[in-house]
Image: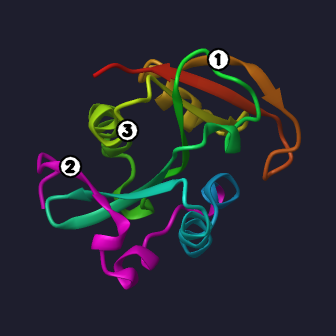
Amino acid sequence: MSDASALTLVAVDRVPRPTLLALRVAPEQLGFVGRVVDLLADAQSRPSADPLAFVLGDQVIGLCCIEREPRTIAPIAFDAPAVGLRGFFIDARWQRRGLGRRALSALLHALPERHPAARLLVLSVDEGNTAALGLYRQAGFVDGAARYHGGPVGRGQRLLLRPFHP
């Protein structure tokens, strides 16, 4: 399969569960992202969650969850109507091909249609996750005012913000 195939977003309820559960991150990324089974259970437990799969051609290559209640990402007020991003990852077998950048671009492009009232995407990222920080900054995310201590792997978390418009 060519990496030039179309990369699309699909609601996870349209993807066979075994296909989703087969997704994995590299062992060193597990502390940043967590296990897919836990991400899916978390998304199913919150009515505000919009879990999405990234599909390249006919292959599911990653996952993320848009959170309609951004206060679950950071318990602060935002200057614009916002949605949050959590659990963004590309399967370990598909990494290092520029697909994270393409997936994030596809997500940003789809947000105005999926969440028309929102104008801001917020996320928190572990300060030790330099690959993710670089990806998000390249995509136009900027540091927010908040910093959290004691993330999943014990380091601080940065709040990143990215305006988007229809």
Q: Is residue 112 magenta?
A: no
- Residues rendered magenta in the picture: 1-28
Find numbered disc 2 in the image and state the secondary structure of the residue it sits on.
Answer: strand
Residue wearing tag 3: 115
Q: Read off the residue under disc 1.
A: 143
Amino acid bearing label 2:
Leu
Q: Is residue 89 visible in the rendered structure shown here? A: no
Left or right of 117? Residue 16 is left
Q: Is residue 103 above or below residue 23?
A: above
How far apart, in angstroms, are the residues tagged by discs 1 and 3?
22 Å
Category of crowding for the residue at label 3, using alpha-carbon neighbours closer than 10 angstroms: few (below 14), some (14–19), many (at least 20): some
Which x, y percent locates residue 22?
Answer: 42, 78
Dot 1 amino acid type: Asp
**Mark 3 belongs to which amino acid?**
His
Label 3 secondary element: loop
Q: Nearer the viewer, residue 114 or 35?
A: 114
Residue 87 x, y percent position in the rendering? 55, 53
Please identify the quadrant where the N terminus is shown: bottom left
Residue drawn where x is 64% and y is 62% of the image: 34
